Image: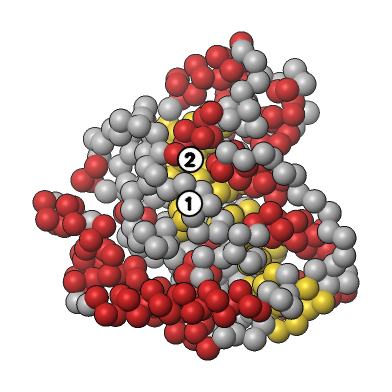
């Protein structure tokens, strides 16, 4: 039988329910993997070893708790937990202990998940990197800002994890680390208990090693009935979008999209080019403006009382940059998003999903930066659901992914399409 830490969440829940596996054995397997590997990966800011084992033993003695009964999960350290420190990736909060769980943490625990620990985030989920390395090659970035979550899932140190995305912080790390990443439609996962970054963009997302697990996790985090991925009645209509920034892509990123499109076409999908609305050509700057404007507002207390403990990049790119922007520019960026969402939504009369890049290519060398988020900013700004699928390898042998983007509020449909795409690509 496979080692418990290599199983999917769906498999773990099924085996525990059938009496073939215990939650305690599952936790031990993950802890052993962490002991073996995390000195190289550095995915955790806090590990709740004893609390996780205690919780597993309680679950093993009692009735089934829910969809995630006995499944270990990691939580990005920008999201509160009442019994574990939450540092937000900043020395300002090195001793911070929240009084309550964030909504997503509480919902996951209610569904039977075991909180194994808190995963490394960049500073306030921005651009200043944390300590985490890419598990496929520690000389390369795992992406950001949800670096620890993506790396821990990819390295079999935990089976599920949460991240957050304001620009590209769920989708890009998933691509760099070779796992499934899911950013839901804006507002689908409750953000109560998450340290705010840009409230009109912030979205909690999920990591897993299978699409079935994404569907399972989604149901738990939304407190809705579980709807397994369904088989499509007919091949989907896929539109390829390289965005206005194709010139920033690496050859392996372009090749992944073109190769995937050819295979989907061969499998019966109707593959077309996505006609980008005019608004999309302005959206990179609009997203960055929104994020910068809200920087000195979301972090007003930190900037006032602890300015010297903020990184130079946060001081300059968020606080100083945001203070230079005026209300009219912020309103214009908000209105651009509204027009863009309406324009893109109208395109879904003729398509089912967009095929695009989650990143320029494989993870770049070095740990000083977390990679280019350009290929995620548009879809975050448009509030659309996105899913990363592992696809191939780049010239350095690192993972290269593809991204599927769906219509707002049709997340379950997007996961169905992703299931069909995955089958066609195999």
The image quarter containing residue 282 is bottom left
Q: In the rendered structure, find residue 298 and report the number of the disc placed on it.
A: none
98 horizontally vs 53: left or right: left
Q: Quadrant of the N terminus?
A: top right
Dot 1: element: strand
Whether pointer 1 and pointer 2 mark residues with C-beta atoms closer than 8 Å, the reply is: yes
Residue 150, image x, y percentages = 53, 50
Residue 325, image x, y percentages = 23, 77
Q: Which residue carries the number 1 mark?
A: 204
84 horizontally vs 212: left or right: left
Residue 133 in view, yes or no: no
Q: Residue at x 39, y 44 (%)?
A: 192
Which one is earlier in the sequence, the residue at label 1 or at label 2?
2
Q: Is residue 157 above or below residue 318?
A: above
Q: Pointer 1: residues within 10 angstroms few (<14), some, or many (20+)?
A: many
Q: Residue furthest left?
A: 305
Residue 208, image x, y percentages = 62, 46
Q: Is residue 22 above or below residue 335?
A: above
The image quarter containing residue 285 is bottom left
| Front residue of 353 and 175 | 353
Q: Residue furthest top?
A: 61
Q: Residue at x 43, y 27 (%)?
A: 48
Q: Residue at x 70, y 23 (%)?
A: 16
What colour scheme does the image use? secondary structure
Dot 2: element: helix
Gap in angstroms between the C-alphas marked 1 and 2: 8 Å
Residue 81, image x, y percentages = 38, 34
Q: Is residue 405 above or below residue 57?
A: below
Q: Pointer 2: residues within 10 angstroms few (<14), some, or many (20+)?
A: many
Q: In the rendered structure, find residue 104 and report the number of the disc placed on it.
A: 2
Residue 421 in view, yes or no: yes
């Amino acid at each position: 039988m496979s080692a418990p830490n290599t199983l999917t969440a769906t498999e773990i829940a099924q085996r525990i329910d059938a009496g073939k596996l215990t939650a305690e054995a599952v936790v031990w397997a993950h802890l052993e993997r962490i002991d073996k590997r995390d000195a190289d990966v550095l995915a955790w800011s806090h590990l709740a070893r004893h609390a996780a084992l205690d919780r597993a033993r309680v679950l093993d003695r009692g009735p089934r708790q829910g969809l995630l009964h006995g499944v270990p999960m990691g939580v990005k350290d920008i999201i509160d937990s009442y019994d574990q420190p939450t540092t937000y990736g900043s020395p300002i909060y090195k001793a911070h202990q929240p009084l309550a769980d964030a909504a997503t943490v509480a919902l996951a625990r209610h569904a039977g998940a075991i909180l194994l620990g808190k995963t490394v985030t960049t500073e306030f989920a921005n651009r200043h990197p944390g300590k985490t390395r890419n598990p496929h090659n520690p000389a390369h970035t795992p992406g950001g800002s949800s670096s620890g979550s993506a790396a821990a899932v990819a390295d079999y140190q935990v089976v599920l994890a949460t991240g957050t995305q304001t620009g590209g912080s769920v989708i890009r790390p998933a691509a760099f680390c070779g796992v499934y990443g899911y950013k839901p439609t804006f507002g689908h996962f409750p953000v109560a208990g998450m340290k705010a970054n840009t409230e009109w963009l912030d979205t909690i997302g999920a990591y897993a090693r299978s699409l079935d697990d994404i569907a399972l996790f989604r149901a738990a985090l939304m407190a809705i009935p579980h709807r397994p991925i369904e088989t499509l009645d007919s091949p989907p209509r896929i539109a390829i979008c390289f965005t206005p920034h194709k010139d920033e892509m690496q050859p392996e990123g372009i090749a992944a999209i073109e190769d995937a499109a050819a295979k989907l076409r061969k499998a019966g999908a109707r593959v077309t080019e996505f006609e980008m609305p005019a608004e999309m050509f302005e959206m990179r700057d609009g997203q960055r403006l929104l994020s910068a404007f809200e920087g000195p507002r979301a972090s007003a207390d930190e900037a006032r009382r602890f300015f010297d403990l903020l990184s130079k990049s946060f001081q300059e790119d968020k606080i100083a940059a945001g203070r230079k922007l005026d209300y009219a520019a912020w309103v214009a960026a908000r209105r651009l998003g509204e027009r863009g969402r309406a324009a893109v939504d109208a395109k879904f009369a003729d398509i089912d999903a967009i095929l695009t890049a989650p990143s320029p290519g494989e993870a770049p060398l070095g740990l000083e930066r977390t990679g280019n988020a350009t290929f995620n900013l548009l879809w975050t700004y448009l509030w659309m659901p996105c899913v990363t699928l592992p696809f191939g390898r780049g010239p350095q042998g690192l993972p290269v992914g593809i991204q599927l983007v769906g219509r707002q509020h049709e997340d379950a449909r997007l996961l169905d399409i992703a299931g069909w795409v995955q089958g066609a690509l195999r």
